[in-house]
Structure formats: structure tokens, C-alpha cells
Image: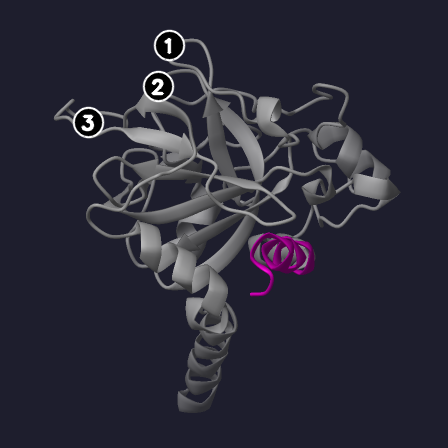
Amino acid sequence: MIVPTLVRLLAVASLANAYSLSTYPKLKAVYDRYNKANSECSALLQDGFYDAGQTKDGHYYRYCGDLGGGLKAIFLHRNGGGLNDMDIDCDGAQACPDDPTFQGQTSFKTAYGGYQGVQELSRAAGAYVSDLNATRHPYVVFGNEGSKPTFNPKDYGMVPLSVMAVVCNGQVHYGVWGDTNGGTSTGEASLAMGNLCFPSEGLGGNNGHDANDVLYIGFRNETAYPGYGGKNHAKWKGTTKEFEDSIRGLGDSLVKGLLGGL
């Protein structure tokens, strides 16, 4: 029927407008500054990382600490200008059918570094889940361990499972820091995050978003942790939209604290 179809289209359009980068002018200025040729990272934290499968053509990725006033942040940047791509991670409670590198758990399934893990946080919220589900929970793979070079965001004040901002496809989305990479590749997020960002690209374990136009921001403050102060912002058993909506208020407040406004 025409009317229900129109209602669905209007709902999608309204949702896209609500998350539009144009409604975040200060964040858009940051995105535009770094998503261009010859942009530079002035507060380098660690470099020498590569995209999975990328040939080493002189371009690499680096963790930068340029952003922040009272609140600090870390973001990924490509040398010579640009940001990062989005490969798809399917680790955790449910695998993607086409993921050749699936691992049965994420890095923060249980307590880590003095902070509650997924199991503890979700149990405290009365909505226990055994681990993050890549098809439901929008999360970012951030940090590198195992192969050199390494980078641990926790050393710079980030808290496991803290809220992260992802600017992609002209929109602003929020997820959590949900996993780390065992090698030297960067630019990876869960299938749920990929579908929020690029719903028409058919992303999967063997198919990512190749353009270096995604901005990942991690907040270097424990207030970004969903369980900070005994609160629990995240709807762990909700749909992808319900989960993101449950942390959007916290995410927006973190962006305001970082940039002095949205």
C-alpha cells in the first residue's frame, strides 16, 4: 500500500535528518579539517598502522590526540590527509556468515582493567548478555596489541566499553569501544555500526567500506563509560537503534565537552 510505504520513507528521512552531521556544526568543522588532502596530525600518539589487506604504499594510519579543550579525545588519521575506512568485525556472541576471521569473544566480554565488562554491566542493568553481538551492538575496534607497533587507548585515559563517536556518510552515530585488534590494522567496526553508517553498501565480514572518510573518536575520560557513577545508560538487549538511542544523550554530552558545543 502507498500510505504505509510513504510513512516508512518519511520515518527513515526523519531519522537521517536527526543524525545529520549538519546539525553538529563544530563536529563537522573537525571532520572537514581532517578529511582532506594534506591535513596533518599535530599531536601524534602512535603511527605505523595499516588497513587490512592494504599494500604498504607509503600511506599509514595513526592515533592522534589533537582534539579537546577540557575533555580530550583520540582519533584515527591517515598520513598525507584523510581519515580511515570501515572494515567489518563480527567477533563476539554471534558471527557474520561470511567472516573468515571470527573470534568467539570480544576483548571486554568480562571485567578489564578494574572496569566492568559486558557481562557485569548488562547484568547490573537487569538485561544480561554474554558478550557484544556484532549484528546488534554498534561497536568500534580501537587499539592494537600483539604485533608491533602497538597502541593501548587505556594508557591515554580511555575506558573499555566507553562511548565513541563515529562520523560517517554525512551522519553522526554512537557506539562503544568494544574490541581491540590483534595486528596492525585499523578502521574496523561491528556489522551493526556498518549498517548504521552505510545501509545500502551490503557490508559484511568480507566486504567493508573502502573510502578513507570515516572519523572515529574515542573520549579520554571515565565519564564516557556507560556505567560511570553507578548509572547504566545502555540498553544491552535492545535493537541496534534502541542501543544507540540509549547512549546518544551521553555521546552528545561528550562531544559538547570536547568541542564546546555540537
Task: Answer whether residue 124 is magenta in the image.
Answer: no
Q: Which mark is residue 184?
A: 2
Q: Amino acid at mark 3?
A: Gln
Q: What kind of secondary structure does the magenta stretch mostly adopt?
A: helix
Q: Badges 3 and 1: C-beta atoms under 8 Å apart?
A: no
Label 1: few (<14), some (14–19) or many (≥20) C-alpha neighbours in 10 Å: few
x then y, percent, for residue 21? 43, 66
Residue at image mark 1: 148
Q: Say whether disc 2 or disc 1 marks the residue closer to the N-terminus.
A: 1
State which quarter of the image contains the C terminus.
Answer: bottom right
* Image location of residue 133, percent across then percent down: 57, 37
x and y, in percent, of residue 229 in the image: 85, 42
The answer for how far apart the CA atoms under marks 2 and 3 are is 11 Å
Which numbered disc, 3 or 1, marks the residue closer to the eye? Answer: 1
Q: Earlier in the sequence, mark 3 or mark 1?
A: 3
Q: Amino acid at mark 2?
A: Thr
Q: Element under label 1?
A: loop
Cβ–Cβ under 8 Å for marks 2 and 1: yes
| Distance between the alpha carbons at the discs numbered 2 and 1 | 7 Å
Asked if residue 41 shows in the view, the reply is: yes
Residue at mark 3: 54
